[in-house]
Image (cartoon, helix red, strand yellow):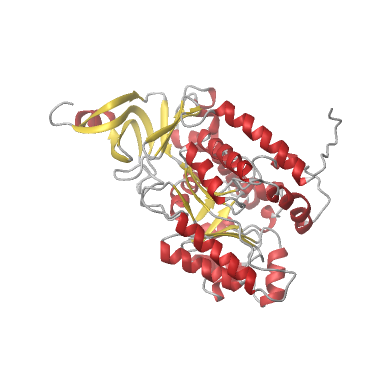
Amino acid sequence: MTIGKQKADVLISGASIVTMDDERSVINDGALAVDGQTIVAVGKSKDVLQRFEAKQIIDGSRFVISPGMVNGHIHVTGDPLTRAWLPDNIDADFEEELTKWVLPRFYAHEPEDECASTELAALKMLRTGTTCFLEAGTVRHLDHVVEGARRTGIRGRVGCWVEGRNYQSADQSKSIGEAIRDLENAAARFPASNDEKIAAWPVLIGHSTNPDEVWQAAKKIADENGLGVSAHMSPYDVDPKWFLEHTGRRPVEHLADIGVLGSNVCLTHLAHIDQSEQDLLAETGTNAVLCPLAALKGAFGLSNVGRFPEMAAAGVNILLGSDGFDQDMLRQAQLVSALFKDTRQDAGVFPAEDMLTMLTRNGAAGLGLEQDIGSLEIGKKADFVCHDTDRPEWQPLVATVNQLAWLADGRSVHSVWVDGIRVIDNYQSTQVDEAELYARAQRSAAAVIERAGLPFISPWPVG
């Protein structure tokens, strides 16, 4: 090392850097220096090279570097192995589809299946530029889910499946007690300490599956341990109807009444909310997670009743999620922006800048990690993505932000760093044997489908 120069482990120079800092600086011919887990320099290549020497210097002239993206709602088990098994034209309402098609697949997962499913989901996320995720609440074998996620090097928050409401019994105390103990145990076993990339949150299924006591316990656990709470709510009008019938209030109104909203709470879907509920989300700082492909494929009615542009204007923090579908978050952002531009007949809705903010800074804030990730700044964790511009979708490179948001997708993700570790290099994982994982996932998928006993339905002959 040259005397007088600061040390770094990795220095990438000559890249275009979309920092997502407070000023939203975009640095052409930029450099990024990493020491250990931390970003130690971001700036013009000439300036950074003058101040730093690194063990490894990488020519970044072919790259656009962005912060790692955040997937705010993904089923890492239940869906990754078997989602494609479900036909589009299931003749069933929401509740019947859950009980006859969705839940049997989830319940059929053995520990090794959930491990393979999580590992596969994490690999798909990393390969398309997502470095952090929030699990949606499908986990039955938490240890194996944590193991699968850790193998890949991804950052995330997971939680075990709890159902504290027993619809078949008037005595709810046993179910409530078991649900609360499961939430407490998960938080204790997998704490969100500074050096743990994978930690457990109280993750509720949502809808009407948990009584007030479980919601309140989840919020208390989150508040006391610096965690968050995640749950589904109001994809269809089934949830508002249920809450109005049983509580006299709409879902978000009822959650406000029992004191469980707040900036550490993420509610997913929220297609069917009214003005009162929108106001409560804004007032309490509660996060809203939109999964555009899931909403459109599930026929939520988002284009007719969705209020997400209005929520954003009111100051609600909006994250994007993939749910059980395409984990390429750039595609999800393109979909939601195009959808609401059309429904509002306003091309200014959710421009490129908003799309990238939802994927990075908003995601980090929703997970309570805004001090660590979401932008490329000195002192933050080294979670970032190198997008390869030596590809036709990137050429010619004339407007970096617009091209990243609208023309690129996960196929151009060349390299990914999480916590200063290069977990994807030259389009391949450095942490897992991809061929072995695919073979293991194939075996698990076949076993889950057989145990679930679901018929194969196809309009075309397959043999």
Q: Quadrant of residue 51?
A: top left
Residue 422, horizontal then vertical, whole percent: 41, 32
Q: How many marks?
A: 0
Residue 322, horizontal then vertical, whole percent: 59, 45
**Can residue 279 be spotted in the picture?**
yes
Rendered residue at 80%/44% (across/down): 454
Q: Outermost residue, left direction?
A: 3
In the displayed structure, would residue 431 be above or below residue 341? above
Image quadrant occupied by the N terminus = top left
Q: Nearer the viewer, residue 125 or 297?
A: 125
Q: Is residue 339 left or right of residue 17?
A: right
Q: Is residue 165 left or right of residue 33?
A: right
**Can residue 261 be spotted in the picture?**
no
Rendered residue at 55%/39% (across/down): 119
Image quadrant occupied by the C terminus = top right
Residue 443, horizontal then vertical, whole percent: 68, 33
Q: Quadrant of residue 137?
A: bottom right
Q: Is residue 453 left or right of residue 138?
A: right
Residue 413, horizontal then vertical, whole percent: 49, 30
In the displayed structure, would residue 44 be above or below residue 305? above
